[in-house]
Image (tube, rainbow, N blue to C red):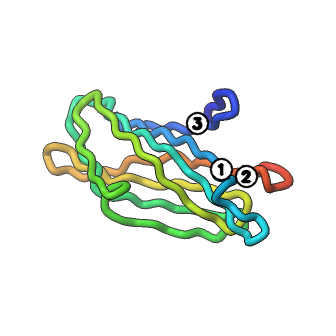
Amino acid sequence: MICVGDINLYSETTKSIRITVVPSFLDEHSSPDDARYVWAYEVKIENLGQETVQLINRHWSITNSLGQTQTVRGPGVVGEQPVLEPGEYFEYISGTPLNTPSGLMSGIYQMEGKNGELFDVSIPVFSLDSPHQLMQVN
């Protein structure tokens, strides 16, 4: 994790694909009295390699501070399966609710190279911390 001002930035590179995530708490969409805490996360997927790749599937693990984990799997991201030429990147914003004021997210993207080979790219583990917790434990 890299802190830039008040921004936490998480980044990891697997097989020349760099994934960078910036989470942010959405106070205006959260309701702590109802145990509803909502985050947005910005993702940047960069092709640092020499081969064209396509994002085929996603697999997320979302864990609240009680250790309860939800798994999300599906094709692409935000309705797209982007193709990235060498040097290109794709950015998107998504979000998730939790029933606790903190948690963790991690996952993988399944990518396909131009030769049809499938490979997994790690999404860095990132922390979901709200101002409604007594202390940040992640």
| Element on which disc 1 rests | strand
Write the residue at 47% across / 55% down. Answer: 107
Other residues around mark 1 within 10 Å, as few (<14) / some (14–19) / many (≥20): many
Residue 16, label in figure: none
| Element on which disc 3 rests | strand
- From the viewer's perspective, is 96 left or right of 55? right
Q: Do the residues labelled 3 and 2 touch (CB within 8 Å)?
A: no
Question: What residue sits right under mark 3 in the picture?
Answer: 9
Residue 25, label in figure: 1
Q: Are marks 2 and 1 in contact (CB under 8 Å)?
A: yes
- From the viewer's perspective, is 50 left or right of 103? left
Q: How many labels does the image show?
A: 3
Mark closest to the chain's N terminus, 3 or 1: 3
Mark 1: amino acid: Phe
Residue 130, label in figure: 2
Mark closest to the chain's N terminus, 3 or 2: 3
Q: Nearer the viewer, residue 32 or 116?
A: 32
**In the rendered view, would you say 61 is above or below 91?**
below
Q: Quadrant of residue 2?
A: top right
Other residues around mark 3 within 10 Å, as few (<14) / some (14–19) / many (≥20): some
| Element on which disc 2 rests | loop
Foreground mark, 3 or 1?
A: 1
- From the viewer's perspective, is 76 left or right of 129? left
**In the rendered view, would you say 23 is above or below 6?**
below
Q: Can residue 49 be seen in this view?
A: yes
- Measured from the top left, where is residue 96 in percent x and y? 55, 60
